Image (cartoon, helix red, strand yellow):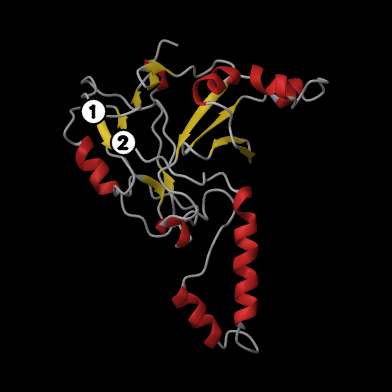
Amino acid sequence: CCFYTQCQTKEPPKPMDTEFTITPCQITYKGKELPLGKPFKEWIKIFGEYNRFVDGVFIWDTLGIGATIHWDAAKYYKDPDYNTRSFIESRPTIELYIFFVNLDSKVGRAGKLQFAWNEYYILSKEEEESLLKSTIRNKPYTQEELDQSREKMLKKKPDYIYPFTPYTQTVNLQGAPVKSGMSLNEVNKERSKIKGLEKMGYWDNDGDWSWDSGSTTIKTGEFREQKDHSSICPN
């Protein structure tokens, strides 16, 4: 799940018990504006030391969030300080990720996260039983092979950006609540209560890179449609 300050609403957000509040032009955490565009060291002051850095994302496993910075590699890659701690902390923070699922969640175990970053898939008990009987190759898979495959995936877990602990609280997204376990239909139902909020959908709902703009039904894909209304923000 990834939230951006891109959708416009004509009504102020309704008060709700939440840490994160997202409006068209800012994100606040515990009532204070997050310093988007400011040095990453300011984010470390707010959230504490990050746990991992994977595929360009700094991850706080215990909080269920992540952030990215603007590396500007074309300009700085020859700089002797490039990719050092001091360089990283000086770079502007450009994106915040809030994760409502993780690799151990029901969605993660079902392989539904494989379309975002690389592939992570743990076979279900039913799928293992099917492969043990399968004639798709010269001989069925053995339990040892399946066990080795599972162990390989478990060892790769730290190589994925999904945090080990998902974000557990409600996010105030332009006055409408978003929380773990909500379906897209439930999210849109809440958004429909606020005048001016657009329905959220998917530009690709089956992971085949075809254009399914506006779709609100997931088949197997996880690509959410994004609306860019950044021009309404003065900064």
Q: How far separated are the C-alphas under marks 2 and 1?
A: 8 Å
Percent of width and height locating residue 198: 27, 34
Q: Is residue 201 left or right of residue 121?
A: left
Percent of width and height locating residue 153: 61, 61
Return the disc, 2 or 1, that comes first in the chain's sequence.
Answer: 1
Percent of width and height locating residue 46: 50, 21
Could you say which is closer to the camera, residue 10 or residue 86? 86
Q: Residues within 10 Å of mark 2 (few under 14, many from 20)?
A: some
Q: Amino acid at mark 2?
A: Thr
The N terminus is located in which quarter? top left
Residue at horizontal 45 percent and vertical 19 percent from the top: 34
Occupied quadrant, residue 50: top right
Occupied quadrant, residue 27: top left
Dot 2: what SS?
A: loop
Q: Are marks 2 and 1 in contact (CB under 8 Å)?
A: yes
Residue at horizontal 59 percent and vertical 21 percent from the top: 40
Can see residue 143? Answer: yes
What residue did someone put label 2 on?
Answer: 170
Q: Amino acid at mark 1?
A: Met
In the image, farthest residue toward the top: 234
Occupied quadrant, residue 144: bottom right
Percent of width and height locating residue 140: 60, 87
Residue at horizontal 36 percent and vertical 55 percent from the top: 218
Residue at horizontal 52 percent and vertical 56 percent from the top: 114
- Tell me if residue 77 comes above or below residue 53 in the rendering: above
What residue did someone put label 1 on?
Answer: 16
